Image (spheres, rainbow, N blue to C red):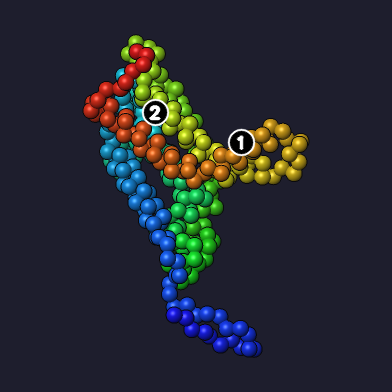
Amino acid sequence: MTTTATRPGGARPRAAIAARTLRTDRWWFAPLITVIGLGAWVTYATVRVFMHDFYWVADYHYLTPFYSPCVTQTCLPEAAHFGRVLPGWWIIPDAALTLPFLLLFRLTCYYYRKAYYRAFWLSPPACAVPDGHETYSGETRFPLIFQNAHRYAFYAAAVISLINTWDAVLAFRSPEGFGFGLGNVILWINVIALWAYTLSCHSCRHIAGGRLKHFSKHPVRYRFWTFVSKLNTRHMQLAWITLGTLAFTDFYIMALSAEWFGDLRFIN
């Protein structure tokens, strides 16, 4: 039921709708799935990061990305590819040098902003549904002003992707020398997915060609910008895919390290 409100000057009245929204579809379903998905992943990742165990498979040099690079005093020496420079306190993650930057990159990602703004902050939860807050100041105040640091977080994420690539290269080892197994396949799928997600970032697209006035004068950058632009159309899908590959890679290496089962080996 609606009523009309009188407007000055005899203008046509506007309907006063008392209902929160007139949408009759399941508009709440997408935010709910996002809450469940992100909540489950954060819970799993938090538990694994602070376990300080089952992150390294010595026979095949498998290091889970959740512990890369392993830099605390509690790290196994052979897993610490870049040295053990931090104290081994339980509260300090073994990958403490990179995890804050990865968290910042994900939190400031344009897609993730949309996802958790809608799902956790109800700002707004869906199109044509009122915002859950009375006021909105944009990203101009603490803490949301740090969303503007996304470009710098991208640089750090690119470096971390290089570290993960190096870990995947080092994993081609076995007690007999060169080796190749299912763990290598899983590690490389994760690395490729992480590179695709990182390069599909909006900031990367702007860096590649955002300031160019004449593409014809910069053919290499133009081709890279074209490649990144194609990836950018899949940024949302890649964001979720990489959460899946990260969790699956970590779980597989944890299972091998805990000796729940052995790695399927193709060579050595």
Residue at numbered disc 2:
186
Circle 1 packing at 10 Å, graded few (<14), some (14-19), many (20+), is: some
Of residue 186 and residue 13, the one placed in the foreground of this image is: 13
Residue shown at the point (42%, 21%) measured from the top left: 170
Q: Amino acid at mark 1?
A: Phe
Residue shown at the point (44%, 30%) measured from the top left: 189
Label total for image: 2
Which quadrant is the N terminus positioned in?
A: bottom left
Residue shown at the point (29%, 43%) measured from the top left: 47
Pointer 2 or 1: first along the chain: 2
Does dot 1 land on a helix, a strand or a loop?
helix
Q: Is residue 264 above or below residue 247?
A: above
- Expressed as whole percent of the image width and height from the top left, the position of residue 68 reads 39, 33
- Expressed as whole percent of the image width and height from the top left, the position of residue 268 reads 34, 13
Residue shown at the point (75%, 44%) measured from the top left: 213
Residue at numbered disc 1:
227
Does dot 2 land on a helix, a strand or a loop?
helix
Of residue 159 and residue 217, the one placed in the foreground of this image is: 217
Q: Is residue 84 above or below residue 24?
A: above
